[in-house]
Amino acid sequence: MSTTAGRSFVTDWTVVVPVIALIALVFSWGRDLPGFAVALVALCLGGAVLAAVHHAEVVAHRVGEPLGSLVLAVAVTVIEVALIVTLMADGGDKTASLARDTVFAAVMITCNGIVGLSLLVGALRNRVAVFNAEGSGAALATVATLATLSLVLPTFTTSKPGPEFSTAQLVFAAVASLALYGLFIAVQTVRHRDYFLPVATEAGTKKADGSGDGSGDGEHAAPPTARAALVSLGLLLVALVAVVGDAKAVSPTIETGVAKAGLPNAVVGVIIALLVLAPETLAGVRAARRDRVQTSLNLAYGSAIASIGLTIPAIALATIWLSGPLLLGLGPIHMVLLALTVVVSSLTIAPGRATLLQGGVHLVLLAAYLFLAVSP
């Protein structure tokens, strides 16, 4: 912010709101809420989303890219995985497909929603959105491989009936997911870090310092102190816990509304995924507005990779005490949408530049997924 008063205001609300949202979570957890209480929790949820975006940008400004994007992606995914395991432990057979539905929703929202919005905003600002094809292409290849191994193959394996892995197959998928995720993180943060740095829109040169991720008002503002970054990291975790927990608190109301509307049960997972991924979506769009489309793509693909790479191993471990089937394989409609997303994304990423058209194509794919979730 440009003034001390402005900074004080931002600091105040971004500290207070996550704490209030967490308190709302404590008092609403495991209870049947009346309508006004649901509205209050939803309001806290929205405030926690905005606070999470702010603190993620502070941390990103301190550590630089691509670590800044990684912080938000991993934090959201770890909490999301905990939520999935908790719901599956409580839900029995009703939640047999919850992991699949949530992970696939995350892939579609990140690869089409965040990517599409970011390209649209970047192209509106500069006519052409510019990014690093090498890094984005590597991330997309990792997403495609993880999604195929974990969500497509179970539909075709024959060791167990239905879209389900055998124990040995699930262990292999979990180990492969962890290995790919670890390899991607090593490449992104150490060996080929420059492939994931933002690209200048005018000069076309890479900003190799990775600083100025847009926290605050200016790209070139001084980075926050280590103490401020640590405080923001703690508040980011508080805000993300509140986002996921408050989303779970309002989920019974969502489930009731979905049931009364006669919609498929999978719609509940889509709605919760949209809520959980809201901080990353807002952060990605804000980065694109600051001519840092590569940061947006790091967030999008990094979130998709983390969602699969951490969820599958966690679920594999949880099957030790979880009862009931674990359905991971996608149906025909979702496999077609996944294949189309991979093909379109490859064509989008390859040139290292994108226009309004590519952004619009990705958003139409997301719209198709959401429509078919409601009307399969």
Image (spheres, rainbow, N blue to C red):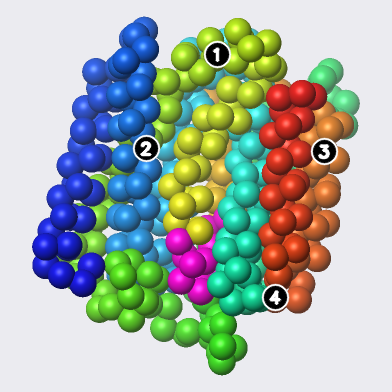
Q: CA distance from mark 2 to mark 3?
A: 32 Å
Is there CB contact under 8 Å for labels 3 and 1?
no
Is there CB contact under 8 Å for labels 2 and 4?
no
- Looking at the rendering, the stretch of residues picked out in magenta corresponds to 286-301
Q: CA distance from mark 3 to mark 1?
A: 28 Å
Residue ID for mark 2: 46
Residue ID for mark 4: 353
Q: Amino acid at mark 1?
A: Gly
Task: Give me the disc on residue 257.
Answer: 1
Residue ID for mark 3: 335
Nearest the camera: 261 or 239? 261
Above or below: residue 316 compared with residue 353: above
> Is 289 contained in the magenta span?
yes
Quarter of the image for the C terminus: give it: top right
Nearest the camera: 373 or 164? 373
Q: Which of pointers 2 and 4 lies earlier in the amino acid sequence?
A: 2
Nearest the camera: 252 or 64? 252
